[in-house]
Amino acid sequence: MNKHPLQYVMIALAVILTGLVGRGSSVLAQEEGTVVIATPADGATVSGLITVTGVVDFPDFLKYEIFLSGGAGLIWAATTYAPVINGDLAMLDTRTFADGTYQMIIRKVNTDSNYTDFTGPTLIIDNGLTAPLPFPEVETSLLYPPPAGALMRLRNCSGNPLEFDYTSPDGFCSADDLWIHHKPQESPICTYVDILLIPCEYRGTAIGMGEKRGASYSFEAENGKVYELSYPGGDRLFIGESLGHPRAETDTGGLDFNDPARYQVAPDANNAATPAAAPAPTSASSSAPAEAAPTTTAGSSDQSDPLLPVSGEDIESRMPFMIVALAVIVFLIGGGIVAARKRGSTV
């Protein structure tokens, strides 16, 4: 049976549309782990204090880490324990890095401690300094309430290394004994570490090296809460519940933290919470919130429009549905034309 020329056109359209639908499906699949860096832009020259903005959200979320890759390898920049949608991802003091070109790397860490690295934009740091500053002036890691577990930020504002232990009378809770570097006298900020806790009652001691007496403490860590602990030295330790970053509600807005398949506490969250391949992070002093520091990046996260994929994985596309609808219309019209020609040829 000879085929009508229009049938060849329809077959060709079917092949093309099938291929396009397949491509569209792969775009949707990439939505399982979205990373978009809105600012700084790829190839931007930056200096001073900057805010990294964008999107980081993926299933089985534990945390994301930001590194800068340069001649010295990966340099840790920030760690955050909550997904962010169209908001602030980190604060960076670029003066603590040598002038030069860097690649931003965003590490997506799952609750089983497995991770994948995403390549972000290229940055050109130009502060005109003969040497990098030894200490940043801001807390680079932003305090967002975690979707699962409780977040504890521990600051050592004393001049001595701090030994800090925490445990719980309840079963299957977090526990550890760690040392935190001292705050150098010339540093404007305190040394800090973030710890993700399984919600439980916690107690322990904090004592500076060389101190005769330490501080004993206890507090109840609740799910989704942020706690700030500051050690000024001696037998004092200040504990308080915190609202975290002032943009927490808007930057994590729209996320369903009740989805257990997407956000859950890691059984060994106390171990997984320690930043991998990172030097001891430092923070802003408790009297000067890092969020108040000025930034040099424009078009920050106050915008309400969806972020464009300046760099990052593909965002969700409606193209597959449009293609399928177009294919149905083409086949209906083409089928009608072929049927009409056949009826005309038989008359």
Image (cartoon, rainbow, N blue to C red):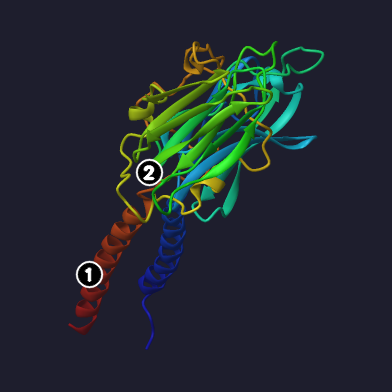
Front-most of residues 291 and 164: 164
Residue 78: image location, x then y, percent = 58, 32
Residue 98: image location, x then y, percent = 76, 22
Furthest-bottom residue in this view: 1
- Element at label 1: helix
Residue 303: image location, x then y, percent = 38, 23
Q: Quadrant of residue 50?
A: top right
Q: CA distance from mark 1 to mark 2?
A: 65 Å
Q: Tag on residue 202? A: none
Badge 2 density bin: few <14, some 14–19, many ≥20, Cα 10 Å: many
User: In the displayed structure, does residue 341 sit left or right of residue 263?
Assistant: left
Look at the picture and state if 198 lies above or below 308.
below
Question: Of the residues under marks 1 and 2, which one precedes in the sequence?
Answer: 2
Look at the picture and state if 32 lies above or below 274.
below
Can residue 53 be seen in this snapshot? no
The residue carrying mark 2 is 199
Front-most of residues 218 and 114: 218
The residue shown at (51%, 52%) is 268
The residue shown at (40%, 43%) is 149
The amino acid type, in three-letter code, at marker 2 is: Pro
Q: The N terminus is located in which quarter?
A: bottom left
Q: Quadrant of residue 76?
A: top right
The residue carrying mark 1 is 336
The amino acid type, in three-letter code, at marker 1 is: Gly
Eye-nearest disc, 1 or 2: 2
User: In the displayed structure, does residue 252 sit left or right of residue 190?
Assistant: left
